[in-house]
Image (cartoon, grey):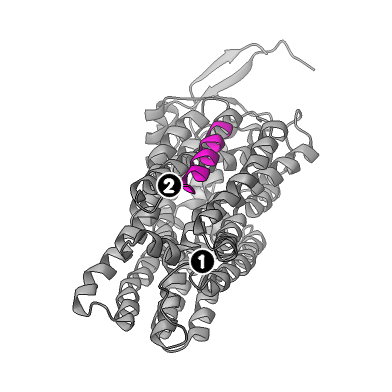
Amino acid sequence: MTSNQPRPRTRLSLRSISSVHYDSLSSEPPDSDAPSMQTNSISQKRSYITVAVLCYINLLNYMDRYTIAGVLLSIQNYFGISDSTSGLLQTVFICSFMFLAPVFGYLGDRYNRKLIMIVGMVVWIVTTLGSSFVKNSHFWILVLTRALVGTGEASYSTIAPTIIGDLFTGNKRTLMISFFYIFIPVGSGLGYILGATIANATGDWRWALRFSPALGGLGLLLLMFLIPEPPRGASDNKGGAAMESTTYIEDVKYLLKNRSFVWSSLGVTAMAFVTGALAFWTPTFLSRAQVTQGLRPPCKEEPCNPLDSYIFGAITVVTGIVGVFLGTFISKKLRDRLPNVDPIICAVGMLSSSPCFFMAIILAGTSIPAAYTFIAIGETLLSLNWAILADILLYVVVPTRRATAEALQIMVCHLLGDAGSPYLIGAISDALLKYDPGSPSWDFRRLEYSFLLCPLIGILGGLFFLTTSLYIKEDRKAAELLTSGQAAEPLETTTESV
């Protein structure tokens, strides 16, 4: 039923932001059991279908991202490239991903999100398929196509979580975000397994890059016909003030003043550094360890032994599922009693996984089963964070700035994290080559010494998340007040007839 009464329409201007004094906000924990109903125009059934489609595409994104790592030994032999050059393949992909993320974040807060994702997926499918036809004399073309693949992921990763945030709220949103982010480790693990399987079956690593675009075509059709475009902030307002988009400068200033967003983004950056380096190099590292122990001969021609890609991929899938659901379960159980539990869980995950990865690195040279055991424990602990981190961003940032927040967090965490870590590990390894060139044993040791940087960065990330826990209670309440139009001081409003 419509009303002739004017409805306040809140414009979150810079003046509005500065009027919210965090120390004057209520210290009561947010209501985690708030109703999680969807917008009136989008049914509950369609909302669940939307999450399923977004999960499927997220799975494909991460399968494609780590297919290269699953066949890295074959690629090194095919092109005759060094460790640092191999790491460049992941670095250029992440660089394009992070630099384009702010662009798609800006567009995602202002224009049709579904259309933006469709365009991005088309670019991803075409460039991924094109990269599979590169000749061994044109390695630079593979580098270029891997860079362009980042366009599709940048458009999708910045926008998809915001659509889920606009369909659900409260504990239901936490659960849906968990389902979405569980496909990061699952997709990553399947990327290793399927990439290695297809390369081994066909005798050509390039066929591994032709599998995910075929599945991507189905994802594109599902995206076009099943995904809605919910109003921004529809699940958060619940009769509160309607929000308008503000300028990009105002959005950035708001986010820089949001202490929970800043510190959690630094924590995500450290996590990205560790996961990026380990995800790209672990199968190759463990393969070299077995060569050193005399368990297998060095790979001289394609296809290289895919066993480590199979095992590491399977571990990533299982530990990812266990870790994400365990983290979500702990968060839901403790959030009402401990409002800052989410960043504490992330801190525990980072700080406890670092010793596990350290032990895996040290033991790889003498016991492969022990190394895999500690990798499995470390990955489980690290996976506690995936869904929680996404949920933190959604509840400490107002709806009209979430895509921008996702984009800026992606840019920072990749710029200082996994954009450089695969290349840096490879570069350190290459720098150590001169001390014993041509030795299979030293090939393993130099990569081992390079890997030791990862546990140190992991400890730093845990400290960043502990700092986040000091501010998250107030910042969450601030976002709720701004969204509902009940900020501590009057907001700038205009009235429009409905």
Q: Categorize mark 1 by other alpha carbons within 10 Å: few (<14), some (14-19), many (20+).
A: many
Residue displayed at 49% across by 84% down: 368
In the rendered image, residue 202 lying in the magenta stretch gets the answer no
Looking at the rendering, in which quadrant would you find the N terminus? Answer: top right
Type of residue at label 2? Arg
Tell me if residue 68 comes above or below residue 249 in the rendering.
below
Q: Position of residue 50 (x, y in %)?
A: 70, 40
CB contact under 8 Å: marks 2 and 1: no
Residue 268 % position (x, y)? 44, 55
Please give the residue where the numbered disc 1 appears in the rendered image: 382
Of callouts 2 and 1, which one flags the residue occurring earlier in the amino acid sequence?
Answer: 2
Q: Alpha carbon of mark 2 to alpha carbon of mark 1: how far?
A: 27 Å
Q: Residues within 10 Å of mark 2 (few under 14, many from 20)?
A: many
- Region of the chain picked out in magenta, as a range: 118-134
In front of the other: 72 or 483: 72
Amino acid type assigned to the residue bearing label 1 in the image: Leu
Q: Secondary structure at mark 2?
A: helix
Q: Identify the residue under disc 2.
A: 146
Is residue 125 found inside the magenta-colored segment of the image?
A: yes
Above or below, 497 relative to 156: above
Residue 159, given in percent of the width and then of the height, sits at 55, 38
The image quarter containing residue 307 is: bottom right
In front of the other: 247 or 448: 448
The one nearer the camera, 387 or 116, is 116
User: Can residue 63 be seen in this snapshot?
Assistant: yes
Horizontal and vertical percent position of residue 102: 42, 36
Give the secondary structure at mark 1: helix
Q: Disc 2 vs disc 1: which is toward the camera? A: 2
Residue in the image at 49% along x and 52% along y? 472
Q: Nearer the viewer, residue 400 or 315?
A: 315
- Report the disc number at residue 396: none
